[in-house]
Amino acid sequence: MTVRVLVPSGALGLGYDAAAMRRGIAAEPDIIAIDGGSTDSGPSYLGRGVSKYSRASTKAEWSGLIEAAAAAGVPLVIGTAGTCGADGAVDWLVGITEEILAETGGSARVAVLKSGQSAADVGRALASGRITPLHPAPDIDGEVLGGCGNIVALAGAEQVNAALDTGADIVIAGRTTDTAIIAALPLARGCHPGGAWHGAKIGECGALCATNPQSGVIMLEFDGEGFNVSPLADGARATPHTVSAHMLYENADPFILHEPGGHLDVTDARYRALDATRVRVTGSRWVPSERYTVKLEGARRVGYQCVMLALLRDRRYVRNVDDWCSGVLSGCRAKVSARLGLEPEGFDIELRVIGRNATLGSLENRVNDAVELGVLAIVTAGSRDAVDEIGKTLNPYLLHHPLTLDEEQPTFAFPFSPAELERGEVFEFCLNHVMELRDPMEAFVLEVREIG
């Protein structure tokens, strides 16, 4: 038994090589599988339940994939729809699908798999001891859960196969593991389980496991012993190095990958070049677990935020930027507390020095003599009004604050006006836990819709 899974790209919205896709369809895949997102871009998308990708780009690419799947006569499946996989993001992509089919005169059976969890249900699971923290998990209780904008459970292969078993032409799934949408059909058809999960991990990001990684399109062929990886774009090649290296991607252990229902162990995997572009992998092992658990993700609002940017070019201020920032912070914080009546723990002002250590902070180990520095101010507080007031209080400090009291007043540059840019609500991840299920579908909702 051989199962061919065509992966157009690492995520819907990133684009894919149209010529390579045509080659993939000509190779007669059994399914087309694409990821819809992840937590890579932070908690805001999950907290708000929205996509980070352009709707126009998503619609154009999704339309092309619907057409390709129909031409090939195979199912099309997407996991983590709308970047975050929240129920609202799933509905967003379902709406786009309805639009596409109406415009093209097409029709499809669409299985909609939702991963959203209510705070009450998760709270009951917590109380019954069915939730286990993963290091470094924060403490959670009913108040934390109730404050989440969205909570999702990561579906595995079992839930994706339940959706495929409906005979769906299209599966739109909420939050799934990146690998589940690829591993599901090979597992259902009896392919090697270790190979199914390992190949799914290698192919989750499309051609990232090959040279020319931006080309996107790859074919994964699964069988009873392992899998083959074949990038399909011109100039793209898979090698034992590029394929094996992908186990390091977003994975704490390069040999172990945890999934619902067990874990993948690639300690004994062997990678062999079949030719100049394709790689064969065998020896991977799937280890079932005694409990069936799914990971939970949740994001809660922690306040509101605005940002400001000041540019420093004066040599003396560039050399003494730490002292300048310290003076700005101490002066502004004291004024905010005195005039707005806010306690120090009720707001936060952070200054990051762009061009020196804005990314790594105190961990930065490379020092240079900058001509110009940008000072990024991040103001966070519990309300929009407080953020607006603090930003306006900070404004004159960033514009005119001197290093010493006896010198002429300096003037620095804001690249835009107004200087305070409102970011609105800000969120933080607050769940790093797994939840035990008595049945794999217990935490998920599956609906089938006839569209068109």
Image (cartoon, rainbow, N blue to C red):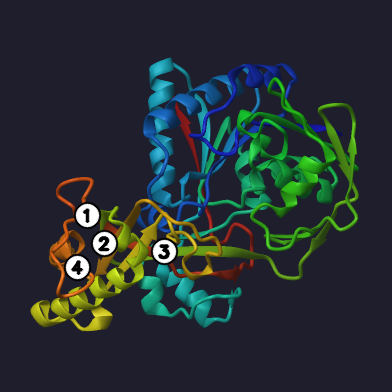
- Secondary structure at numbered mark 1: strand
Q: CA distance from mark 4 to mark 3?
A: 40 Å
Mark 1 in CB contact with mark 3 (< 8 angstroms): no
Closest to the observer, 176 or 128: 176
| Residue in the image at 90% along x and 55% along y | 268
Dot 2 or dot 3, earlier in sequence: 3
Quadrant the N terminus occupies: top right
Label 1 close to label 2 by CB (< 8 Å): yes
- Sequence-wise, which precedes: disc 1 or disc 2? 2
- For the residue marked with disc 4, what is the amino acid? Pro
Q: CA distance from mark 1 to mark 3?
A: 20 Å
> In the image shown, does 438 or 292 lie closer to the viewer?
292
Side of 411 where 283 appears, left or right:
right
Q: Nearer the viewer, residue 307 or 351?
A: 351
Give coordinates of residue 66: x percent, y percent. Answer: 53, 24
Label 4 belongs to which residue? 402
**Which one is in front in this view, the residue at disc 4 or the one at disc 1?**
4
Q: Is residue 446 above or below residue 300?
A: above
Q: Is residue 122 left or right of residue 386?
A: right
As drawn, is 309 to the left or to the right of 239? left
Q: The disc labelled 2 sits on which kind of residue?
A: Gln
Residue hosting label 2: 305
Residue type, label 1: Glu
The residue drawn where x is 65% and y is 34% is 213
| SS state under label 3 | strand
